[in-house]
Amino acid sequence: MIVTITINGKKESLQIEPGDMLVDTLRNAGHVEVKKGCDTGNCGVCTVLLDGKPIRSCSFLAVRAEGHEITTIQGVAEEARRFADFLNREGADQCGFCAPGFALTVIAMKRELKNPTEEEIRHYLAGNLCRCTGYESQHRAIRNYLEADHA
Amino acid sequence: MEIKEYVRPSSLEEAYQLMRTRHATPLGGCVWLRMNAKPVALGVDLASLDLDYIRDTGDMIEIGAMTTYRSLETSNLLAKQYGKLFPEALSHIVGVQLRATISVGGTVAGRYGFSDLNTTLSALGAKVVLYPGTITDLATFIAEGAESPFLVEKILLPKGVRGAYQQIRITRNDFPILNVAVAWTGSAWRVAVGSRPAATRLCHAAMQMLGSDPCPSDQTIEAASMQAAEETSVGSDIRASHDYRKAVLPVLIRRALLEVRG
């Protein structure tokens, strides 16, 4: 079957099987910036935005993306680069595998929550696992990134 | 996940007839269904049936079957009615991304043992509406199931109920070792225990012990908590032993009762 999905602002018609998960559909279409991690919905690596809200593409049927707008990290490249500067300053990135899903979730949080508390930040990011950083440096980077907008 | 044939009906009747005549599998959030290696011969996608809603009908709250956990967690309407109950019961489940996909109907229909939502809904005295119009007490449905095929349409919640939720987990995003929800309905107490590790059950003797007093004494709460642990069948699994669950259960119930009583 064919589905038409708007990916990073561009309409794409893609051949899929009805049981295909969105992560595989996106990667098969060349969007390899969407990473495939645990494939069980636990790690958050495969996060993309569906109409601006974060979802796990490994647990979302591709057929349900028909007519919707999907944003990968490439779709918010400029904002992601800005956030990456804060990560780098705090040494909050190591292997980088979780970074696309992590950065997308941070950007979605910034759009959804106004002036989030430390607890709200940790809560929102709880589903993005990182095996390198221990999270503290990431949280410093997020706090600095959010505060920069208010400076 | 393998779906051999896929249909997206535009009405509940069409979906139900496909289930009745062709043994179709309803597709809710699919988060748990997709973990099953068994292929789906005919998948009926419920995504276009306008079942994603939380609304106040005057005397009750209706929650559509395709409403996501994230919607429950962030609903102002539910917050106004039940305070922090839904965020406290659901917000520790994996992450915001997955909770934006998990559906209420899928959880209820699956009668999953690990469910935090089914425990919470059971304590609140929810009813489940099965298309084409059967209304059943949700706790009874969880315990006994329904004649197949059935299609969960929506959940009905009574208003004016105060509830509290307690749970214990090994790690934040893991399945619960135990979860507990209690509620004061305005005329009676309800006590539900889930993740035993089996599915949610009400603690009828403990509920009777608490009676119709909105402010039971500390002694009554202690006795009801012990009674709930006594009457609830629990088991052992990879997360905890039978004995551990038995020891923890009255503590969780006591905390929840004290929270509601104030």
Image: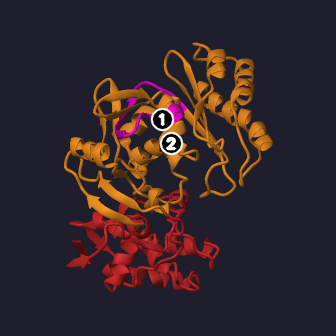
Q: Front-most of B204 and A122? A: B204
Please identify the quarter of the rendering in which residue A81 is found.
Answer: bottom left
**In the rendered image, the vertical position of residue B83 relative to residue B110, given as above or below:** above
> Pointer 2: what residue?
B111
Residue at point 73%, 32% (across, down): B250
Task: Check whether the beta carbons of the residues at disc 1 and disc 2 lie within 8 A of each other.
Answer: yes
Please identify the quarter of the rendering in which residue A56 is found.
Answer: bottom left
Q: Secondary structure at mark 1?
A: loop
Q: Secondary structure at mark 2?
A: loop
Residue at point 63%, 33% (across, down): B256
Name the tint of chain A in the rendering: red
Instruction: Provide the residue span drawn in magenta.
Output: B142-163
Q: CA distance from mark 1 to mark 2?
A: 8 Å
- Measured as percent of width and height from the top left, residue A36 is found at 47, 77
The N terminus of chain A: image quadrant? bottom left
Disc 1 is attached to a residue of which chain? B
Left or right: residue A63 compared with residue B98: left
Left or right: residue A6 compared with residue B109: left
- How would you rate the neighbour count of disc 1 (Cα within 10 Å): few for under 14, some for 14-19, many for 20 or more? some
Q: As shown in the figure, which amino acid type bears the numbered disc 2?
A: Arg
Q: As shown in the figure, which amino acid type bears the numbered disc 1?
A: Gly
The C terminus of chain A: image quadrant? bottom left
- Let me know if marks 1 and 2 both belong to one chain: yes
Name the tint of chain B in the rendering: orange
